[in-house]
Image (cartoon, rainbow, N blue to C red):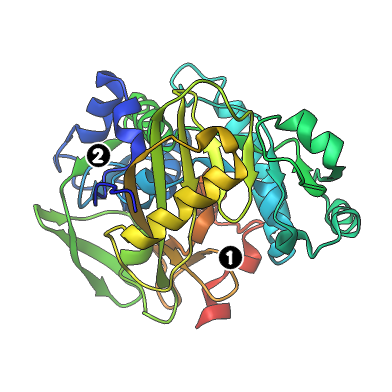
Amino acid sequence: MESLPLTNASIWRHTLSPADQSELERDDGLAHARPDVLVVGGGIVGLATAYFLATQKKSVLLIEANTLGAGATAAAAGGIWPSDQGPHHPPAFQPLALRSRDLWGRLSLKPDFDIDWRVNGFLTVNPNRFRNDAVAFAHEAQEAGYTVHAVDAEQITHLEPQLRPGLSAGIHCASDAHLNPLKAAASFARASRRLGARFAVRTEFVSSKRVGAHVVEVQTSRGPCSPGQVVICSGALAPVPAHFVRPVSGQMIATGPLPPLLRGTVGGQFLTLQLKTGEMITGGTVAENDHQEPDATLSFQMAQAARELIPALANVPFTQAWCGIRSATRDGLPIVDRVPDCDNLWISTGHFRNGLLLAPATGQLLADWITTGVCSEELEPLNAARVS
């Protein structure tokens, strides 16, 4: 069994420029202690929420216990895969996911958003994902509004020539995309700062003080804050009732930089993709625990599956492994809602494997709700009552 370093530092760190690294580590302090909105949690969901609030001309302070993007965001695979995932989710997922994918595309055109955006598709060749009937599955997904097509052996070879022979059927999602999650986090921070938002890193949420149905003060590890509104976006560690969300661990491994082998993401036993910088990554497991250290046996299984899928990887070592903890709800949809019995406390959590995908949509729609007082139709199914 090959030995992979037992590290929780994901592949994305070394892809950052010094400027992006600075955006994630920079501390603006708590000088602005009476913001219109305090956002708790500096992962991609909190950062997107802060950005869209700032575009609404709200004064925003975000606090993060670590550095920005340090949790599940840094451990993500980088997938913007609504069509691959959509048929496995409740109907409410579709409008939110497609809206968010399109938002990412528009954001990628803005000067502050250097995110390695690629619309390079997702090819599923694992028959368990399409119930051994690619044509019927594709028809069902198309009826639900997703861009999905059944493909045969010849088309699979055309799409991904490096895959092993003998794959007879698959599902191709041509409009699915990919980005660099930490570059996306740095981009949201940079763009938000230009709009006046502030970020206090290495600053923990300690407690909140309520008077009646109103939060009047939040105590942080660096002192008090008196915000107009409070939004909790801290994922699996969010200070919300335990029955709302549960922690789910996921693991990935990576090679060093390689010549081009894959064009898009391929879903086999595990998902496998190649970064713009050349590294091959594979994994995307789901384990009902909060483990943060990679499992060596699982890493070996993922490496072997990748080599079976892509023969050119036969002698290529996988040199890095990492885990991330995501928050999940029982129906797979996030909770984006105002906390019952409190007029200025909001939660946006439980995004599970789709924090990166859904962050722009949930951030934008929640910012609109906070600003206008009107909840959109897309957010109505994401209410907290369904899990309480």
**Does residue 27 appear left or right of residue 180 in this picture?**
left
Instruction: Quickly name the residue at label 2.
Output: 199
- Percent across and percent down for residue 231 are 38, 57
**Does residue 341 appear left or right of residue 222 in this picture?**
right
Residue 48, relative to residue 380: is it above or below? above
Instruction: Quickly name the residue at label 1.
Output: 333
Kind of residue at badge 2: Phe
Residue 278 or residue 215, whichever sits in front = 278
Residue 120 lies in quadrant: top right
Residue 333, relative to residue 317: is it above or below? below
- Percent across and percent down for residue 13 are 30, 33
- Percent across and percent down for residue 198 are 26, 36
**Does residue 136 appear left or right of residue 274 in this picture?**
right
Residue 316 or residue 383, whichever sits in front = 316
Residue found at x 24% / y 47%: 5
C-alpha span from label 1 to label 2 = 28 Å
Residue 64 or residue 274, whichever sits in front = 274
Q: Quadrant of the N terminus?
A: bottom left
Residue 357 appears in view: no
Residue found at x 44% / y 49%: 45
- Earlier residue among tags 1 and 2: 2
Residue 74, relative to residue 329: is it above or below? above
Residue 185 appears in view: yes
Residue found at x 72% / y 52%: 95
Residue 80 or residue 337, whichever sits in front = 80
Task: Single out the mark in the foreground, 1 or 2.
Answer: 1
